[in-house]
Image: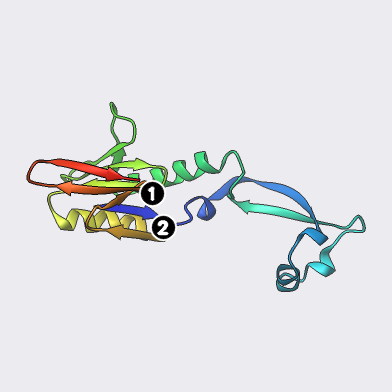
Amino acid sequence: MTMDISNMYLNTPLDRYEYMKMRLIDISPEIIKQYNLQSKVAPDGYVYIEIRRAMYGLKQSGMLANKELKAVLAKTGYHPSKTTPGLYKHITRPISFTLVVDGFGVKYTNKNDTIHLENTIKAHYPMKSDWSGHRYVGIDLDWNYTTRTTRHER
């Protein structure tokens, strides 16, 4: 099966806040109205912004998101392999998965173990599961369980 976390970066708190400025004229009228930005514009025409959560474009976003995800997984017994980067195993359950950014490729023998992993992730992130294992990291997989092979399409 495969799992995918939605908006993983955007749900990650920064370890220290970042700051930026944007010209008010570069912000859509809907956003200006929604956040009452007209009352917050500085005399120089800029709105000054405090960033508290990771966002695309911040160089530390990926590292912080990965660090937080590892901590979430460790709390319920999932740890990275000491010898294979990207491979995780549980300390007592016969389940393993590969992790690429926010995509999981899960190998399991007991569905309850997979539900345990799903619940671990769902408690912290919005995510989707695909029990067919058809789509992983943007690649469509065609599994043949008899010959233990797969073909892929992009």
Q: CA distance from mark 2 to mark 1?
A: 8 Å
Residue 91 sits above or below residue 30 on the image: above
Is 93 on the left or on the right of 104, as rendered? left
Counting from the top left corner in percent of width and height, residue 116 is at 24, 56
For the residue pair 60 and 143, the one nearer the viewer reads as 143
* Label 2 vs 1, first from the N-terminus: 1
Q: Secondary structure at mark 2?
A: loop
Mark 1 lies on residue: 72
Mark 2 lies on residue: 124
Outermost residue, top side: 83
Q: How many residues crowd around disc 1 within 10 Å: few (fewer than 14), some, or many (20 or more)?
A: some
Q: How many residues crowd around disc 2 within 10 Å: few (fewer than 14), some, or many (20 or more)?
A: some
**CB contact under 8 Å: marks 2 and 1:** yes
Residue 101 sits above or below residue 38 on the image: above
Give the residue drawn at x 41%, y 61%.
126
Give amino acid for label 2.
His
For the residue pair 53 and 154, the one nearer the viewer reads as 154
Give amino acid for label 1.
Val
Counting from the top left corner in percent of width and height, residue 105 is at 28, 46
Counting from the top left corner in percent of width and height, residue 154 is at 35, 46
Let me know if residue 111 appears in the view: yes
Counting the numbered discs, the total is: 2
Outermost residue, right side: 43
Let me know if residue 77 appears in the view: no
Give the residue drawn at x 72%, y 48%.
19
Q: Secondary structure at mark 1?
A: helix
